[in-house]
Image (cartoon, rainbow, N blue to C red):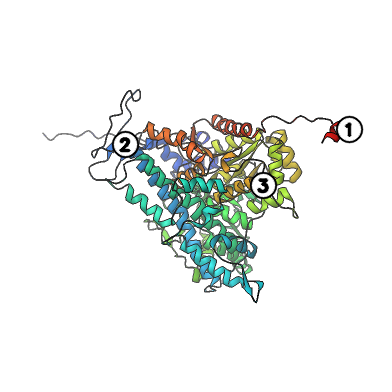
């Protein structure tokens, strides 16, 4: 008799509880709406797909075909010698360090390749090979030129004359591009760091040679049978991370500012409630602003607005997701639709007529969600295509940028009348003041005539501002959406710590209403609230996208230069944080902050915890070398208080931990003075 196989009924997938999945009301409503429609989102997938407990601790090696070798920590921890090894004998330290530096390589590559793309468009604009782009910020061009070895003046007959701007721009573009592959010398921007930090890097031999080389070298060293010393591996990780923060990311920020304009504070809105039912909704998502900058101009043109009206729409609502959102927000005030975990939800509103994506942080499931609605999903970058058939690819080319942008905007407009499902746009949105940066902080706090960081330093020294914190990074579906970013930011400002933020963290803070000057009165401690009220800034400053973390490095450098708070970034009462991190870019960012002297807290689990010796090295011993270290916390309040404790430790070391007593001086005292 034939064997009868019992077929188990497939388990019904679990659904996320919207209130457990996100703190954001808009997201909660749309998660529930998606579930009602039977459309799966990342929040539901997180309920059914569990992470690998070994991989998450960094102790699975799959760098050759004898493995994967998985080295779980014994229950109850390691007693005595750690005898775990892979097939080739690789120890947990080697495996975790290899995996970790490969994450740095990927993160640094992503930011730096973005920078390279911008540098290529910049050079093409400087050479006037395209009409779509023109140099917008000549002052910033002149500021960065000397750092890239470009003279801004020329001596003629003993007289120093200004050089031609076009000539300077071409040389800046050429020298910038050389940073990726030059044969000699070192990363030019390393010299922008405070001198003691540069000296530490030099002494430890970690100044990058060129951007591509340091990333390639990680792939070589982590191939089977090459580097088997975790300290040597992390040293190379440091070179590659510095290539990101002080290289590819910093070049991307600078060249974007010169080409598209340096941001200054402006007002806009945040959250999916910025979408409009009676407008064509076009959403740009990803990272490189080169195409989306042109889309802004086209979407705002009368020709396209009139065309949208012929299709029954009242206008065109352009909004952004992830770091493209931050780029367009800080320069044009384009509203932010959402951060990483809200990308599927934007389509689930039923009102997204087109979503245009380029590179990084784009979920492949967008294509499956788009299939359930009328949304046109358009990929635009040769590096980022999708296999699903409903995805349209319009490859961006800077020489035809205007034509590409027009085609895309028109496609969104033509799709307006194809909406087939009920439109459900939640009605929540917040006001945000964004567009802060090194330059604007200078003028905001120092005034137009003597723009400098002295006033900021003065307020840190007198204790109104206890210290500075950078909160950056992603959302992670393993953690409640936006919860940690917002809880940590609120706890810090309550304790008079001024917060600088970028990326998806900035979007989370904006959605929670922390980016208006008025929010200081509600959430900030008395000292910080006084400063915010006096100069009219929010207690949480939006510094842009993830490549703009370079703005935080340079702002910290300016604080050092202004004086009174030590000689190096590691002396400052400052700390960094990436609470809901998930991307390899976040690891690269964390490591360049640590090796630039910043105490940096990430949440757990962390991909080094399965190798206690290596984990201990990056959490404790790195501080002796660079002054910064990795630190961890899983509870957001504990996370914030670790940062505050570090800030207080630095205040004490600087001798500014006690409020100075006010002494009334009599005549004798004055004469003695
Ligand atoms: O680069 S914060 S989820 S969007 S990786 Fe991605 Fe993380 Fe958001 Fe910007 Ni940064």
**Mark 2 highlights which residue?**
10
Quadrant where the C terminus is found in the figure: top right
Disc 2 Cβ-to-ligand 1 distance below 8 Å: no
Position of residue 488 relative to residue 553, above or below, is above
Residue 334 in view: no
Where is residue 304? Give x, y as percent. 59, 67
Where is residue 582? Give x, y as percent. 45, 42
Looking at the rendered image, the disc whose residue lies closer to the viewer, 3 or 1, is 1
Tally of numbered discs: 3
- Rounded to the nearest angstrom, the CA distance separating label 1 from label 2 is 89 Å
Query: In this view of the protein, which residue sits in the foreground, 378 or 11?
Result: 378
Query: In this view of the protein, which residue sits in the foreground, 36 or 558?
Result: 558
**Mark 1 highlights which residue?**
667
Question: Farthest front residue?
Answer: 672
- Rounded to the nearest angstrom, the CA distance separating label 3 from label 2 is 65 Å
Position of residue 184 relative to residue 666, above or below, is below
User: Which residue is found at the position 71% from the left and 52% from the top?
Assistant: 451
Where is residue 72? Give x, y as percent. 31, 31
Q: Quadrant of residue 668?
A: top right
**Mark 3 highlights which residue?**
562
Question: Farthest right residue?
Answer: 667
Give the class, few, some or many, for how many residues have Cα within 10 Å of label 1's Cα (few <14, many ≥20).
few
Which callout, 3 or 2, points at the residue further toward the start of the chain? Answer: 2
Q: Quadrant of residue 70?
A: top left
Tell me, for residue 594, which label it has, or none: none
Looking at the rendered image, the disc whose residue lies closer to the viewer, 1 or 2, is 1
- Secondary structure under tag 3 reads helix
Looking at the rendered image, the disc whose residue lies closer to the viewer, 3 or 2, is 3
- Secondary structure under tag 2 reads loop
- Secondary structure under tag 1 reads helix
């Amino acid at each position: 008799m034939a064997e009868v196989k019992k077929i188990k009924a497939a388990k019904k997938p679990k659904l996320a509880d919207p209130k457990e999945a996100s703190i954001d009301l808009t997201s909660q409503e749309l998660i529930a709406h998606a579930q009602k429609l039977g459309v799966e989102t990342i929040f539901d997938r997180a309920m059914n797909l569990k992470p690998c407990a070994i991989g998450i601790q960094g102790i699975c090696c799959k760098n050759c075909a004898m493995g994967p070798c998985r080295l779980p920590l014994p229950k109850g921890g390691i007693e005595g010698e750690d005898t775990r090894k892979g097939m080739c004998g690789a120890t947990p330290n080697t495996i975790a360090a290899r995996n970790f530096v490969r994450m740095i390589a990927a993160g640094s590559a992503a930011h730096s390749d973005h920078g390279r793309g911008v540098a290529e468009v910049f050079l093409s604009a400087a050479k006037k090979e395209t009409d779509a782009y023109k140099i917008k910020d000549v002052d910033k061009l002149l500021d960065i030129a000397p750092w890239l070895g470009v003279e801004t003046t020329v001596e003629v007959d003993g007289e120093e004359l200004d050089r031609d701007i076009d000539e300077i721009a071409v040389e800046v573009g050429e020298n910038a591009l050389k940073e990726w592959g030059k044969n000699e010398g070192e990363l030019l921007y390393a010299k922008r760091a405070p001198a003691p930090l540069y000296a530490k890097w030099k002494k430890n031999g970690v100044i990058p040679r060129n951007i591509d080389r340091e990333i390639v070298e990680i792939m070589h060293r982590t191939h089977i049978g090459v580097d088997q010393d975790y300290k040597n591996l992390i040293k190379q990780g440091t070179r590659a991370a510095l290539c990101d923060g002080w290289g590819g990311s910093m070049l991307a920020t600078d060249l974007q500012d010169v080409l598209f304009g340096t941001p200054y504070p402006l007002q806009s809105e945040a959250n999916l409630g910025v979408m409009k039912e009676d407008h064509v909704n076009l959403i740009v998502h990803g990272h490189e602003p080169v195409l989306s900058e042109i889309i802004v101009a086209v979407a705002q043109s009368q020709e396209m607005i009139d065309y949208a009206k012929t299709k029954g729409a009242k206008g065109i609502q352009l909004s952004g997701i992830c770091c493209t959102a931050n780029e367009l927000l800080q320069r044009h005030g384009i509203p932010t639709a959402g951060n990483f975990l809200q990308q599927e939800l934007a389509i689930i509103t039923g009102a997204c007529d087109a979503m245009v994506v380029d590179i990084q942080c784009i979920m492949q499931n967008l294509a499956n969600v788009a299939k359930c609605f009328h949304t046109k999903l358009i990929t635009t970058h040769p590096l980022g295509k999708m296999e699903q058939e409903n995805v349209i690819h319009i490859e961006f080319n800077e020489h035809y940028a205007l034509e590409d942008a027009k085609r895309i905007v028109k496609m969104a407009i033509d799709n307006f009348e194809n909406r087939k499902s009920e439109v459900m746009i939640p009605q929540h949105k917040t006001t945000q003041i964004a567009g802060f940066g090194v330059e604007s902080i200078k003028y905001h706090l120092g005034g137009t005539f003597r723009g400098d960081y002295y006033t900021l330093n003065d307020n840190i020294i007198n204790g109104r501002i206890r210290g500075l914190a950078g909160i950056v990074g992603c959302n992670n579906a393993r953690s409640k959406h936006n919860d940690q970013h917002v809880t940590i930011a609120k706890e810090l400002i309550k304790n008079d710590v001024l917060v600088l933020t970028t990326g998806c963290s900035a979007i989370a803070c904006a959605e929670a209403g922390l980016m208006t000057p008025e929010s200081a009165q509600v959430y900030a401690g008395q000292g910080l609230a006084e400063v915010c009220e006096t100069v009219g800034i929010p207690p949480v400053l939006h510094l842009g996208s993830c490549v703009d973390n370079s703005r935080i490095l340079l702002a910290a450098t300016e604080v050092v230069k202004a004086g009174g708070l030590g000689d190096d970034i590691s002396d400052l009462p400052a700390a960094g944080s990436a609470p809901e991190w998930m991307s390899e870019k976040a690891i690269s960012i964390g490591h360049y902050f640590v090796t630039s002297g910043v105490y940096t807290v990430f949440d757990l689990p962390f991909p080094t915890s399965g190798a206690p010796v290596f984990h201990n090295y990056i959490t404790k011993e790195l501080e002796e070398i660079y002054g910064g270290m990795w630190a961890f916390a899983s509870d957001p309040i504990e996370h914030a208080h670790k940062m505050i404790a570090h800030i207080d430790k630095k205040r004490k070391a600087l001798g500014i931990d006690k409020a100075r007593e006010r002494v009334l001086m009599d005549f004798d005292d004055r004469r003695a003075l």
